[in-house]
């Protein structure tokens, strides 16, 4: 079974080159965040208003990272509707 002329290493390179720089930056930042979370696994006491919770640091970091992603998505949608 022969492949089409577009299949092969060159077409893969073209697909990688077509990915916008902001996507690459987001992927690198997400990977760095994941590495940071993986390295910080000790338990911490977290206080917020009147609540106190003891949890592994990686869970707290993951929650904050996901909250940042959600906030970024919400702000991105809002700014794209204005255009």
Image (tube, grey):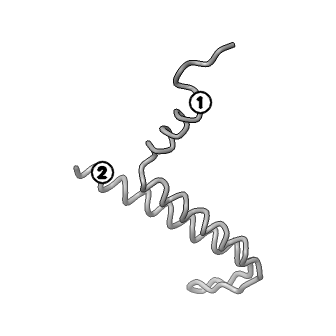
The residue carrying mark 1 is: 8
Q: Nearer the viewer, residue 46 or 52?
A: 46
Task: Residue 23 in the image: state x and y as whole percent.
Answer: 47, 53
Which quadrant of the figure has residue 31?
bottom right
Q: Residue at x 41, y 57 (%)?
A: 74
42 horizontally vs 24: left or right: right
Mark 2 or mark 1: name the one nearer the start of the chain.
1
Label 1, secondary structure: give it: loop
Above or below: residue 13 compared with residue 29: above
Q: Does 31 sit above or below residue 40?
A: above
Q: Secondary structure beneath disc 2?
A: helix
70 left or right, relative to 82: right
19 lies left or right of 79: right
The circle on residue 40 is none
Spot the residue most to the left.
83
Q: CA distance from mark 2 to mark 1?
A: 36 Å
User: Residue 57, how many percent across, how many down?
Assistant: 70, 78
Q: Choose mark 2 or mark 1, whichever is in front.
A: 1
x and y percent of residue 30 in the render? 57, 62
Q: Position of residue 81 (x, y in %)?
A: 28, 49
Residue drawn at (48%, 38%) of the image: 14
The structure residue drawn at horizontal position 37% and vertical position 56%, both measured from the top left corner, is 76
Q: Nearer the viewer, residue 31 or 77?
A: 31
Q: Nearer the viewer, residue 20 or 51?
A: 20
Residue 80 has which mark?
2
Q: What residue appears at the point 30 percent right and 51 percent down from the top-left corner?
A: 80
Q: Is the residue marked by circle 2 packed among few (<14), some (14-19), or many (20+) residues within 10 Å?
A: few
Q: Quadrant of residue 78?
A: bottom left
């Amino acid at each position: 079974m022969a492949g089409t002329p577009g299949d092969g290493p060159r077409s893969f390179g073209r697909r990688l080159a077509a990915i916008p720089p902001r996507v690459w930056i987001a992927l690198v930042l997400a990977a760095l965040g994941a590495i940071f979370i993986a390295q910080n696994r000790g338990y911490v006491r977290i206080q917020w208003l009147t609540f106190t919770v003891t949890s592994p640091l990686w869970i707290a970091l993951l929650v904050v990272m996901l909250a940042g992603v959600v906030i970024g998505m919400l702000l991105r949608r809002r700014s794209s509707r204005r255009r």
